[in-house]
Each structure stands twice: as structure tokens, then as C-alpha cells.
Image (tube, helix red, strand yellow):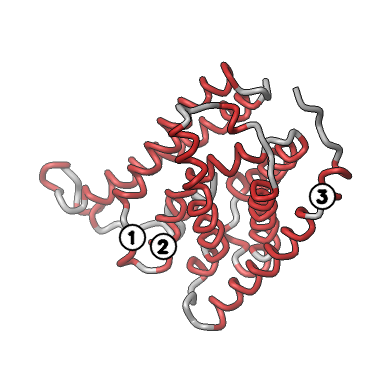
């Protein structure tokens, strides 16, 4: 097994400070551009700016690595390597997590929940730093395709006409439940990091909880169109949606 890097060794790599500077600068500029240009106006729209940028970059950049992983016959050795490209993407996502909490505390504090914000983000920062120390940042780059459902959700949060609940739910089911479940078994059997599968196990119940919420919300949403078949009472049909719906509270991985 490859030896672990110390934190000092991780941050002494030239690609790390460069990636952080570029990532922080780009995300901050994009955030304020969206606000100043009027593209985002509501509290909800502003809260999705950084998540949209992060999920877009992560989804696009992960595609070639995911295809290589698939074409290799799901060879786990490809998820235990390191390179400047993989390291840069990890630094980018860490930058997003930090900015989502810091800028979010100023511009959309009431939309940062305890679970999906104050617990989720520091937890993932810790996991990503561990991957950098373990020289396995390719694991993150390859699995960033799991950000596709978040990208779909972010687009729908900007404009109602861009919303596609079916695409979101189906991609969430395939990637964050089916593929994730497969990865738990594969990591335990074949990945060089012996405890990485436990990280996947810890995250999986959260995805199950989110998917249960997605299905429940969609049943209630479409039940309003078929009150006779669903035996929905008029009181339920006219009930207003909560200020922050379940989908609004789902963020990243």
C-alpha cells in the first residue's frame, strides 16, 4: 500500500494552492455575476448558484474518467491513483463546500440546514482531504458523475420551465442508489483503501432518505391532478407547499 502524505505534503504540492486560488476566484466571481446580472433574484435562486457551478463542473469533468472506469470492466485500480488533474478537482469541490457555508451564511442563511450544510460540508471536506493524503483523488473524480442529479435539480431551481422531476428522480435512483450500492461491494472487495467502503456505507442511508422524500413529494404533487383516483380531499388539493420543499433541501453528494 502507498504511504500516506502528511497535510504539509499535500498543501506543498504546487497544484494545490494554485487550484484553490483559481477555484475560489472563479466561484466568487460567478456568484456575484449571477446576482448583479439579475439572473438570480430570489433567496432560493441565489442559494443554488454555487451548487449549480459545482455540479456542472464536476459532472462534465467526471465523464471521461467514468467512461474509462466502465470500459476497464470496473477496474478498482483506477480509483486508487493520483494526478494533478484529480487533485485540482478535489480542491475545487473543497472550495465550493467552504464558500457555500461562508457566503451562504450571509446571503441565504435560512436555507443552510444542519444536516445538508453544517454537518454534510465539513464531513465531506474531511473525506476529501483524506483522499488527497491517501493519493486516491481519482476516486472522487470518477464518481463525480453522481453530481448529475444535483445539476438537474439546480437548473430547475433557477427556472420552473427547466424543472424535470422525472429526470432528477431517475438519475438519482440509478447513480446514488443502484451504482452506489454496487460500489460499496466493489470497494470492500477490491479497493486498496480498506476503509473506503465504510465511507460509502455511511453516506448510503442519507441517499435512501432523500429518495424516499423525492418519491413522497412526487406522489403528493401528482395526486393533486387525480383526486378521484388518489382519493385526495379538497383540503389537501388546495394546501400550499411548504416554504422550503424537500427537493430544495437536497444539495450535493
Residue 241, percent across and down?
Answer: 36, 57
On-image quarter of the N terminus: top right
Q: Which mark is residue 47?
A: none
Residue 249 point in image, percent of width and height: 50, 52
Rendered location of residue 191, percent (x, y): 61, 23
Q: Secondary structure at mark 3?
A: loop
Answer above or below: position of 49 versus 71. Answer: below
Q: What is the quadrant of residue 32 in the picture?
A: bottom right
Q: CB under 8 Å between callouts 2 and 1?
A: yes
Crowding around mark 1 (Cα neighbors within 10 Å: few <14, some 14 to 19, many 20+) is some
Q: Nearer the viewer, mark 2 or mark 3?
A: 3
Q: Are marks 2 and 3 in contact (CB under 8 Å)?
A: no
Relative to 84, say whether 33 is above or below: below
User: Residue 126 appears in which quarter of the rendering?
Assistant: top right
In space, the residues marked 2 and 3 are separated at their CA atoms by: 35 Å
The residue at the point 62 percent across, 39 percent down is 138
Which residue is more in the foreground, 136 or 229?
A: 136
Q: Which residue is mark 2?
A: 155
Instruction: Pick the residue in front: 235 or 63.
Output: 63
Q: Report the label total.
A: 3
Say which mark, if any, is on residue 13.
3
Q: Is residue 21 left or right of residue 115?
A: right
In this view, the residue in front, 237 or 56, is 56
Which residue in the structure is indicated by mark 1?
A: 163
Horizontal side, residue 24 vs residue 182: left or right: right
What residue appears at the point 16 percent right and 42 percent down from the top-left corner? 231
Q: Residue at x 30, y 47 (%)?
A: 218
Amino acid at each position: 500500500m502507498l504511504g500516506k502524505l502528511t497535510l504539509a505534503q499535500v498543501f506543498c504540492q504546487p497544484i494545490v494552492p494554485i487550484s484553490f486560488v483559481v477555484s475560489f476566484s472563479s466561484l466568487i466571481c460567478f456568484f456575484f455575476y449571477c446576482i448583479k446580472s439579475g439572473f438570480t433574484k430570489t433567496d432560493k435562486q441565489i442559494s443554488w448558484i454555487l451548487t449549480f457551478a459545482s455540479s456542472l463542473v464536476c459532472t462534465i469533468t467526471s465523464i471521461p474518467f467514468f467512461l474509462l472506469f466502465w470500459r476497464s470492466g470496473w477496474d478498482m485500480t483506477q480509483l486508487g491513483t493520483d494526478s494533478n488533474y484529480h487533485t485540482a478537482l478535489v480542491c475545487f469541490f473543497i472550495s465550493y463546500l467552504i464558500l457555500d457555508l461562508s457566503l451562504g451564511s450571509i446571503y441565504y442563511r435560512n436555507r443552510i440546514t444542519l444536516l445538508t450544510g453544517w454537518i454534510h460540508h465539513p464531513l465531506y471536506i474531511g473525506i476529501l482531504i483524506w483522499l488527497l493524503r491517501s493519493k486516491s483523488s481519482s476516486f472522487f473524480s470518477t464518481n463525480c458523475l453522481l453530481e448529475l442529479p444535483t445539476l438537474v435539480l439546480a437548473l430547475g431551481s433557477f427556472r420552473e420551465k427547466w424543472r424535470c422531476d422525472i429526470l432528477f428522480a431517475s438519475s438519482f435512483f440509478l447513480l446514488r442508489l443502484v451504482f452506489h450500492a454496487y460500489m460499496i461491494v466493489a470497494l470492500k472487495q477490491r479497493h486498496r483503501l480498506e476503509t473506503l467502503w465504510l465511507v460509502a456505507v455511511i453516506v448510503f442511508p442519507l441517499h435512501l432518505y432523500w429518495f424516499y422524500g423525492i418519491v413522497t413529494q412526487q406522489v403528493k404533487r401528482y395526486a393533486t391532478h387525480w383526486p378521484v383516483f388518489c382519493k385526495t380531499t379538497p383540503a389537501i388539493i388546495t394546501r400550499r407547499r411548504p416554504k422550503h420543499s424537500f427537493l430544495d433541501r437536497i444539495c450535493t453528494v
